Image (spheres, rainbow, N blue to C red):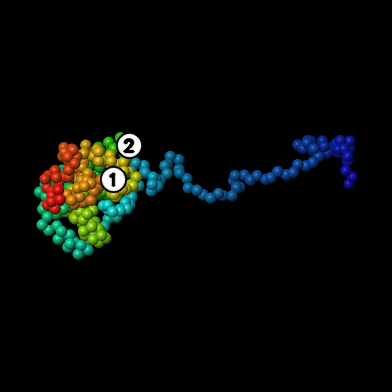
């Protein structure tokens, strides 16, 4: 068909233009159809993602503190050459290990006043058989332990002092956490035997106490770490800001570093900057000022150690 040179000079074209104008078109050329847009309802379903309901906080991760301010429970502490701590309850000891332990305990003096806040328990002095403190409570401080763990407990007076110590540390920008406090005689027995099986009895005795001679059984001792759990009950703790703060301030609240550096021959244990022992503010002050051990305070120093002085 012959195209018209000018759309405006032909009557038929004029009529068509009028019709198109009324229908919303501005010219003869029919606009290209626009791309169809699908409505949201017709859009393909996206991968479903978990969301947090309004007003609900996300669950803390293993590295994130829980809502209570305490670290995630059951933090495993990996020991190095220093004292080892337990993550799971030890198994029942074998018969031979029990016999060896009984031999070690034979002839050891039994302390007369196990309830004393300044009781001396060491490799030469043991608690009465199956001794259990009667005033154990849960200190209101963070722990690297499950919430209901018995190893959180301490004797009432020591627990109150621990709360004051932790509060003072927090005020100074030091976040502390308990690692292990009270241990029953049964638990200590199984724990010690596990270490004996692993390292032999002589090495085990340098970092773990023979059942009945552990300060943890008194309810007056606690192993402490930073809230992040780093270097907990291991030798690197000595270089942390938490250890330095404890060394300077623990005695103010009635605690001493029970196994200080350079006193291994007297205490019988390696240097443990994390092991705190409650003895009361008065005795703690004297021990701190003189730079001595609890053995030296009581004038009870092992013969082998005395010979080296």
User: Residue 266: percent from the left, percent from the top?
Assistant: 17, 49
Check disc 1 and report its element: helix, strand or loop. helix
Relative image position of residue 77 (x, y in whole percent):
31, 51
Whether residue 266 appears in this view of the structure is yes
Q: Position of residue 86 (x, y in %)?
A: 28, 53
- Would you call the spot at circle 2 few (<14 residues within 10 Å), some (14-19), or many (20 or more)? few
Residue 45 horizontal side relative to residue 165, left or right: right
Q: Nearer the viewer, residue 103 or 71?
A: 103
Front-lying residue, 213 or 52: 213
Marks 2 and 1 in Cβ contact (< 8 Å): no
Residue at image position (29%, 55%) is 88
Would you name the residue on which mark 2 appears? 173
Quick one: label 2 or label 1, which is nearer the N terminus? 2
Q: CA distance from mark 2 to mark 1?
A: 18 Å
Nearer-the-camera pick, 252 or 26 = 252
Residue topped by disc 1: 238
Residue 260 percent across, percent down from the top left: 22, 46
């Amino acid at each position: 068909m012959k195209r018209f040179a000018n759309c405006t000079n032909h009557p038929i074209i004029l009529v068509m233009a009028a019709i198109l104008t009324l229908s919303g078109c501005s010219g003869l050329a029919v606009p290209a159809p626009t791309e169809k847009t699908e409505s949201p309802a017709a859009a393909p379903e996206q991968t479903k993602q978990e969301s947090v309901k309004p007003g609900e906080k996300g669950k803390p991760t293993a590295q994130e503190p829980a809502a209570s301010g305490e670290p995630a429970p059951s933090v495993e502490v990996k020991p190095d050459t220093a004292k080892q701590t337990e993550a799971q309850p030890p198994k029942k000891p074998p018969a031979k290990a029990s016999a060896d332990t009984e031999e070690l305990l034979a002839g050891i003096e039994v302390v007369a006043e196990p309830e004393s806040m300044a009781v001396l328990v060491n490799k030469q002095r043991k608690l009465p058989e199956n001794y259990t403190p009667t005033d154990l409570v849960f200190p209101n401080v963070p722990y690297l332990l499950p919430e209901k763990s018995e190893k959180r407990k301490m004797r009432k007076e020591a627990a109150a002092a621990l709360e004051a110590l932790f509060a003072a540390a927090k005020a100074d920008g030091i976040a502390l956490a308990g690692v292990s406090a009270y241990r029953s005689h049964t638990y200590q027995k199984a724990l010690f035997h596990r270490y004996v099986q692993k390292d032999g009895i002589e090495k085990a005795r340098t970092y773990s106490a023979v059942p009945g001679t552990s300060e943890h059984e008194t309810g007056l001792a606690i192993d402490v770490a930073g809230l992040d759990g780093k270097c907990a009950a291991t030798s690197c703790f000595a270089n942390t800001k938490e250890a330095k703060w404890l060394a300077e301030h623990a005695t103010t609240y009635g605690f001493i570093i029970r196994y200080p550096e350079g006193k291994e021959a007297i205490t019988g244990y390696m240097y443990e900057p994390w092991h705190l022992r409650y003895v009361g503010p008065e005795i703690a002050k004297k021990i701190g000022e003189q730079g001595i051990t609890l053995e030296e305070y009581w004038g009870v120093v092992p013969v082998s150690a005395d010979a080296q002085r």
